Image (cartoon, rainbow, N blue to C red):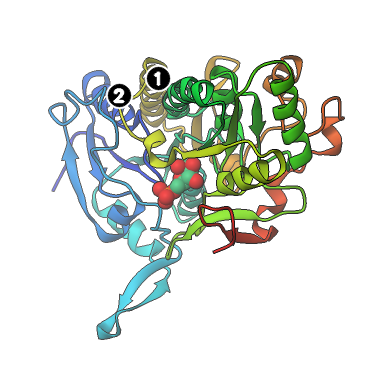
């Protein structure tokens, strides 16, 4: 069949986040309205590309989705085309196969000029490899973790920040009434962006970050100091990737077939039992979990996702594949996907928000006045080597 119009593929990969539909809408509208292109949407991330599950996306699909959470395309964080889980005959066992050539064949059979891959580090890493096999790709960065290299911010982050801040605000009033220590655990994987930003926005007294393994004595000193000042409650904002100095990463579960199969969660139970043990002050734990990924996108995320989506189509129209759209110093730009793939962007000692927290007297889990450089541990090269443990709600090991 001879096609007159250029066709573009699109998929959303990895964990969902608010703003995905805004980005899809921007891609479809720009492609159709500005360039008279067609768009094909693959279902469930790379899974749809490997299994040839797709549908023609048109303006009707893109209508009314700007403010809707999730993704109308579906997504998956367990579908690496190079290490693809396939059910083996009647044995009900999975084997891993390289299905990347099938993905390329499916892409080519649709006559697409390129693929817009909206995702996080896993999606960018998969994209870089698929590009080597001949699929022209443009990346669009999303994740509530904000941990992608090459862009100052990913969409999804601001909406999660709004949710986490709202939760901290609510916990403040009950902490105050009961004179308790409230520990709120936020997502973010190995990067502390969400914990730091929500801790600042929500007025947290102690913020525990994966990049600064904590000293429990320093945390308890802060709680005692506040009590001595007549502030009989404390708010601890704890990143899910936080750990004690020399301690383990705390796991919620291990996920079969996922390229990075570790799911963090539960460190706040350990922090809680440690604080109760050392101070005798009553603690309560709130783990926000997937609430942070749900709901409507914030206005900022809608705008960012829209700008990214429009720019991705502009790059595709110009044939500038191999790029991920990005925001740097508030300007829209793009970086090579190969520069992003396989990397993670964590906090550093020089991050301005860290300095802001220190100026405010917020405890970052290290002794007051300590040189932060002495406590910093870059999770990037080491996180896979850290020991892990699962913790139950009394703080003990499972
Ligand atoms: O990467 C986004 C994220 O929400 C992380 O913050 C979290 O650790 C992880 O995904 C949870 O993954 P899943 O949805 O597979 O439990």
Tell me: residue 341, above or below residue 363: below
- In this orientation, which residue lies closer to the viewer: 360 or 316? 360
Identify the secondary structure beneath mark 2.
Answer: helix
Count all numbered tags in the image, as a single digit. 2
What residue sits 66% from the left and 41% below the top? Answer: 275
What residue sits 32% from the left and 43% below the top? Answer: 11
Q: Position of residue 214 (x, y in %)?
A: 73, 41
Q: Is residue 126 visible?
A: yes
Q: Position of residue 86 (x, y in %)?
A: 34, 72
What residue sits 70% from the left and 38% below the top? Answer: 279
Q: Position of residue 190 (x, y in %)?
A: 61, 44
- In this orientation, which residue lies closer to the viewer: 187 or 65? 187
Q: From the image, tell me which residue sits under label 2.
A: 26
Identify the secondary structure beneath mark 1.
Answer: helix
Q: From the image, tell me which residue sits under label 1.
A: 307
What residue sits 53% from the left and 21% below the top? Answer: 176
Label 1: few (<14), some (14–19) or many (≥20) C-alpha neighbours in 10 Å: some
Tell me: residue 125, above or below residue 212: below
- In this orientation, which residue lies closer to the viewer: 23 or 273? 273
Q: Earlier in the sequence, mark 1 or mark 2?
A: 2
Whether the residues at callouts 1 and 2 have beta carbons within 8 Å, the answer is: yes
- In this orientation, which residue lies closer to the viewer: 244 or 87? 244
Q: Position of residue 347 (x, y in %)?
A: 68, 33
Give the spatial CA distance, label 1 vs label 2. Answer: 8 Å
Quadrant position of residue 139: top left
């Amino acid at each position: 069949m001879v096609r007159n119009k250029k066709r573009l593929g699109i998929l959303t990969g990895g964990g969902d986040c608010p703003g995905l539909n805004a980005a899809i809408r921007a891609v479809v509208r720009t492609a159709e309205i500005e360039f008279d292109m067609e768009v094909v949407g693959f279902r469930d991330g790379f899974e749809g590309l490997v299994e040839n599950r797709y549908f023609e996306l048109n303006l009707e699909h893109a209508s009314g989705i700007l403010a809707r959470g999730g993704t109308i395309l579906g997504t998956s964080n367990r579908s690496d085309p190079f290490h693809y889980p396939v059910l083996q005959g009647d044995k009900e066992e999975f084997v891993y196969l390289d299905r990347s050539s099938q993905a390329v064949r499916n892409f080519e059979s649709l006559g697409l000029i390129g693929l817009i891959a909206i995702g996080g580090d896993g999606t960018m890493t998969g994209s870089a490899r698929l590009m080597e096999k001949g699929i022209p790709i443009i990346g669009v960065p999303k994740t509530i973790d904000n941990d992608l290299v090459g862009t100052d911010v990913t969409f999804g982050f601001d909406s999660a920040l709004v949710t986490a801040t709202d939760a901290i605000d609510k916990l403040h009033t009950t902490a105050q009434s009961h004179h308790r220590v409230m520990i709120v655990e936020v997502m973010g994987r190995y990067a502390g962006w969400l914990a730091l930003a929500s801790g600042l926005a929500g007025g947290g007294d102690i913020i525990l970050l994966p990049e600064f393994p904590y000293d429990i004595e320093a945390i308890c000193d802060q709680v005692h100091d506040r009590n001595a000042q007549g502030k009989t409650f404390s708010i601890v904002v704890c990143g899910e990737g936080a750990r004690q100095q020399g301690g383990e990463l705390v796991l919620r579960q291990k996920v079969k077939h996922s390229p990075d199969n570790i799911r963090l969660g539960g460190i706040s139970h350990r922090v809680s039992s440690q604080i109760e043990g050392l101070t005798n002050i009553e603690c309560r734990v709130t783990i926000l979990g997937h609430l942070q990924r749900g709901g409507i996108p914030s206005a900022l995320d809608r705008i960012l996702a829209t700008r990214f989506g429009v720019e991705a189509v502009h790059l595709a129209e110009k044939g500038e594949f191999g790029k991920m759209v990005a925001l740097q110093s508030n300007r829209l730009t793009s970086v090579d996907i190969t520069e992003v793939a396989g990397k993670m962007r964590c906090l550093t000692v020089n991050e301005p928000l860290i300095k802001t927290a220190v100026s405010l007297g917020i405890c970052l889990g290290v002794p007051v006045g300590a040189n932060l450089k002495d406590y910093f541990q870059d999770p990037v090269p080491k996180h896979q080597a850290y020991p892990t443990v699962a913790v139950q709600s009394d703080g003990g090991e499972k």
